[in-house]
Amino acid sequence: MTDSQIHDYRAGFVAVIGRPNVGKSTLVNALVGSKISIVSSRPQTTRHRMLGIASFPDGQLVLVDTPGIHAKQSRAMNRHMNRAARGAVSDVHASILVIEAGRWHSDDALAYQALKDSDVPVLLVINKIDKLKDKDALLPFIKQVTENREFASVHLISALKSKGTADLVRSLLQLMPESEPLYGEDEITDKSQRFLAGELVREQLMQRLGDELPYSATVEIEKFEENGGLLRIGAVIWLEREGQKAIVIGKGGQQLKAISTSARLGMEKLFGSKVFLETWCRVRDGWSDDEAALRRFGYND
Ligand code: GDP
Ligand code: MG
């Protein structure tokens, strides 16, 4: 590398903020180019702050994916998630406010306020433009949202289809300081494979069981062993009540089998190796409202 190339390289942290379900995790995955952050149509799928590392020839973006900011904070889990989202805004070089095309929600305003209280540039991402039927409504919508609010730039994006992301990356890199890469260029996240394995099982629970299962269901990886190119993983699905077991296991074990198979395929794709996955259910009473239990399951940031 010549001197001038070294000086052209930019790297920094970018917080991805917004109300639940606007597509923050989908956007992070699109920028990183791998599915590291789980996605579902249920709000509150993302429970932890996690880093997505996106490396380009001229720079590196370390994206901080966050749980959605929302006004209701009744339970310990919600308090944890709001803390994680607001904490992400400190110590970044730019923030992205993600909203859904065509809808401006009071929780969007809440997220904007949280960003404005920090001192970093805010980029507006209007996501899910592929869903918008009336394209003529877009200009008035942009005007409504940007009037009296300050954004470094505005981007029309479909995170799902990776549309509009190149322009967003260019704008973000310009806002980053000149720096060496902050992470190895082959790294994609700060989380361990063990953590990601648990998340992929939880994603299946969220996607397949919809509203039948309370938000409190969680996954603990009890075994994670590598042996001759094969990963042996044991996952416990923790539930709040005995009665929830039947829902997760399903008739003749079909549901749990489907959850296991899809999670295993996701792991094989992400880890690039063969996976042998065992999953089972256990019950623990009322843990999602119990701060000590939250810490035990890793919700401690
Ligand atoms: P988060 O809660 O903000 O992290 O949102 P997710 O990334 O989990 O996405 C929530 C839902 O919106 C999922 O069902 C995604 O597939 C969907 N979604 C995300 N981005 C887009 C997009 O650009 N277009 C469409 N049509 N759906 C999207
Ligand atoms: Mg998310």
Image (tube, rainbow, N blue to C red):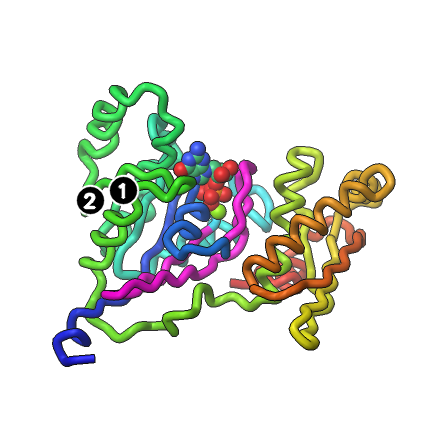
> What residue did someone put label 2 on?
153
Place of residue 172 in the rendered image (x, y in percent of width and height, measured from the top left)? 24, 55
> What residue did someone put label 1 on?
124
Q: Earlier in the sequence, mark 2 or mark 1?
A: 1
Q: CA distance from mark 2 to mark 1?
A: 6 Å
Tell me the SS state at disc 2.
strand
Disc 2 packing (10 Å; few <14; some 14–19; many ≥20): some
Q: Is residue 111 visible?
A: yes
Residue type highlighted by circle 2: Ser
Place of residue 299 in the rendered image (x, y in percent of width and height, measured from the top left)? 58, 60
Disc 1 packing (10 Å; few <14; some 14–19; many ≥20): many
- What residue sits 84% from the left and 45% below the top? 242
- Quarter that holds the N terminus: bottom left
Place of residue 240 in the rendered image (x, y in percent of width and height, measured from the top left)? 75, 47
Residue 60 magenta-drawn?
yes
Identify the magenta region.
37-66
Relative to residue 4, is residue 71 depicted above or below? Answer: above
